[in-house]
Amino acid sequence: MILRLDGTLQEAGCITWRDGHCEGYGRGEHPESPAFAFTRDVDYCSGAFLMVRRQVFEALGGLDEVFAPAYFEEVDLCMRIRAAGFRVGYEPRAQITHFEYGSVESSASAKALYDRNHVTFVERYGSVLRSAHLDPTRGALAARARTPHPGAVLLLDGAEDVGDETDSLFRDAFTSLRLAGTAITYLRLAPTDRPGMEENALRRSGIEVVRAATLSEIRAFLAEREKFYSLVIHSASKNVHLVDEAIAAISSTLIKDEAIALGRADVRRGRPAEGEESREDRS
């Protein structure tokens, strides 16, 4: 995580768009936002704060001097790292404050260097950019993480008390979705400060963790994520009504493909999934 001198984000991992231009995810945002607090694979990390295994760095020939003195040298390196079968990751627990553009003579000289090296970069990686990178119109939220599987899943936890049954259900879901390479958001409806599942461990495993205490907070979150999720899985015990209202909002504003409507599995204790009979009814 790279911070600017005013304490806002410079970037929380970086995006390489299909046209070869780049973007620091979260620029100008608050660094403590849940959106930037979890580990994830990214297109690249800025050379201002980038750690590479020495063996990999030397095997790949280090930074390509064609991009000297600056711009696109770390983007090029990260492209080659992935091509060699490795991953590039963002780790929010490591933070620095960066004096941005402190080593350039002027903004005009920085732009000239950027434009020159952008042409070189696109000439080198045009086919990869077209096949494996998103168009800028898709937005930074869709491009903030590199995942093998398209789409994203929202796990909505409305259980007031953490119990073994709820934990087990969600742990199974987390495991399956992570193995499938899907982006995951764990949204815990928590009117109190009682902890949910081990949230820091979830963040370290690449899962975004968000807390909401009221319906207004849920609606604000959903408004930011309109048409982002492809599947919603939810569980609730005492917060059933809050979950129901959240699901109603999700079904009308959030699901990416309206033809799919709402794909979900209702795993509330003692309550059958929508359209199913309870065990007692079946018996």
Image (cartoon, helix red, strand yellow):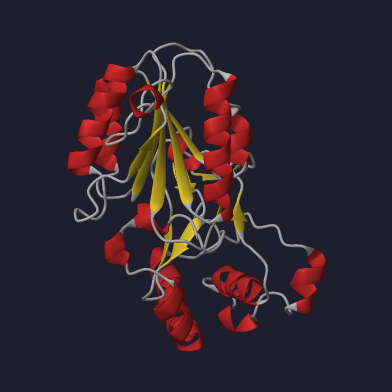
Q: Quadrant of the N terminus?
A: top right
Observer able to see residue 27: no
Q: Residue at 75% of width from left, 71% of height from top?
A: 57
Q: Where, by quadrant of the figure, is residue 144 drawn?
A: bottom left
**14 w.r.t. 238: above or below:** below
Q: Position of residue 244 (x, y in %)?
A: 26, 25
> What number of labels is visible?
0
Q: Residue at 46% of width from left, 88% of height from top?
A: 123
Nearer the observer, 199 or 105: 199
Query: Farthest residue toward the bottom?
Result: 123
Query: Farthest residue toward the front?
Result: 283
Q: Position of residue 262 (x, y in %)?
A: 26, 44
Q: Position of residue 280 (x, y in %)?
A: 38, 22
**116 w.r.t. 232: above or below:** below
Q: Position of residue 63 (x, y in %)?
A: 67, 75
**193 w.r.t. 133: above or below:** above
Instruction: Judge from the rendering whether residue 153 lies leftward or rightward of residue 77; answer left or right.
Output: left
Q: Residue at 58% of width from left, 35% of height from top?
A: 171
Q: Quadrant of the C terminus?
A: top left
Instruction: Judge from the rendering whether residue 53 lies leftward or rightward of residue 117; answer left or right.
Output: right
Nearer the observer, 248 or 227: 248
Q: Where, by quadrant of the figure, is residue 197 drawn?
A: top right
Nearer the observer, 216 or 261: 261
Q: Residue at 53% of width from left, 59% of height from top?
A: 42
Observer able to see residue 115: yes
Instruction: Judge from the rendering whether residue 102 lies leftward or rightward of residue 91; answer left or right.
Output: left
